[in-house]
Image: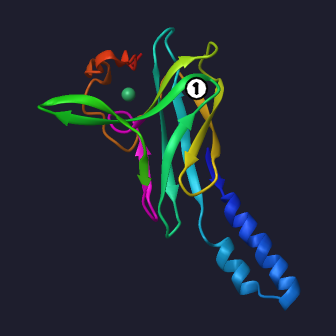
């Protein structure tokens, strides 16, 4: 599933251009420029079905066609009490996870959240979830208006893009109680 989104601000700007065009005569070029300003897409958003009492992981692709940069500054979902962005790093020969408070989104970027790399960590489901369910996840950005993305809940998540080079379940998750074992 591919969700394409035009930021609200662009829609508002377009409205201003249309209003201006009505006043000053048609200026379709300006309108086209703004419409072609760019798109943001979330590709195949999935979370792994949570095991009772344990956090789970979420994955997706992110594509941005804008010439400008942005930043994810927060992630939340009504289906979980807390959602964090994590990355997997090697420190002293050990793979471990680090929490990302924000994530830079460069111009014309393509970013993968995939097993073995960046992922969402979703803590404390607010209700029982099973494979086939869907949940909403809200991404809050520094620049564009927030986006609500629908994630599929799957017992087995696809491993694409980033090669899984380790047993995620054996990572040092410290006190985070990370329950991201493969089924
Ligand atoms: Cu994690």
Query: Residue 132 versus residue 168: which sits nearer the camera?
Result: 168
Q: Position of residue 155 (x, y in %)?
A: 52, 20
Q: Residue shown at 28%/18% (left/top)?
A: 174
Q: Position of residue 77 (x, y in %)?
A: 61, 30
Q: Residue shown at 54%/33% (left/top)?
A: 46
**Quick check: 70 above or below 78?**
below
**Secondary structure of residue under mark 1:** strand
- Quadrant field for ligand 1: top left
* Quarter occupied by the N terminus: top right
Q: Residue furthest left?
A: 92
Q: Is residue 166 left or right of residue 158?
A: left
**Quick check: 93 above or below 104?**
above
Q: Position of residue 125 (x, y in %)?
A: 57, 17
Q: Is residue 22 left or right of residue 103?
A: right
Query: Where are the magenta residues, as a range?
Result: 105-119
Query: Residue 96 versus residue 145: which sits nearer the camera?
Result: 145
Q: Is residue 1 magenta?
A: no
Q: Main secondary structure of the magenta part?
A: loop
Q: Position of residue 120 (x, y in %)?
A: 46, 33
Please indicate, yes or no, whether residue 25 appears anywhere in the rendered image: no
Residue designated by label 1: 153
């Amino acid at each position: 599933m591919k969700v394409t989104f035009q930021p609200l601000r662009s829609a508002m700007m377009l409205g201003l251009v249309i209003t201006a065009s009505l006043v000053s005569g048609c200026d379709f070029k300006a309108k086209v420029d703004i419409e072609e300003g760019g798109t943001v897409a979330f590709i195949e958003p999935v979370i792994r079905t949570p095991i009772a009492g344990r956090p789970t992981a979420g994955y997706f692709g992110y594509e941005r066609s804008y010439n400008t940069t942005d930043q994810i500054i927060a992630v939340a979902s009504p289906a979980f009490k807390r959602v964090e962005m994590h990355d997997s790093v090697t420190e002293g020969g050990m793979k471990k996870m680090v929490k990302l408070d924000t994530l830079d989104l460069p111009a014309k970027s393509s970013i993968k959240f995939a097993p073995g790399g960046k992922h969402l960590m979703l803590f404390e489901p607010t209700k029982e979830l099973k494979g086939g369910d869907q949940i909403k996840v809200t991404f809050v950005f520094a620049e564009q208006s927030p986006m609500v993305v629908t994630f599929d809940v799957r017992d087995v998540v696809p491993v694409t893009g980033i090669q899984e080079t380790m047993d995620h379940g054996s990572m040092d998750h410290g006190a985070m109680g990370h329950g991201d074992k493969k089924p």
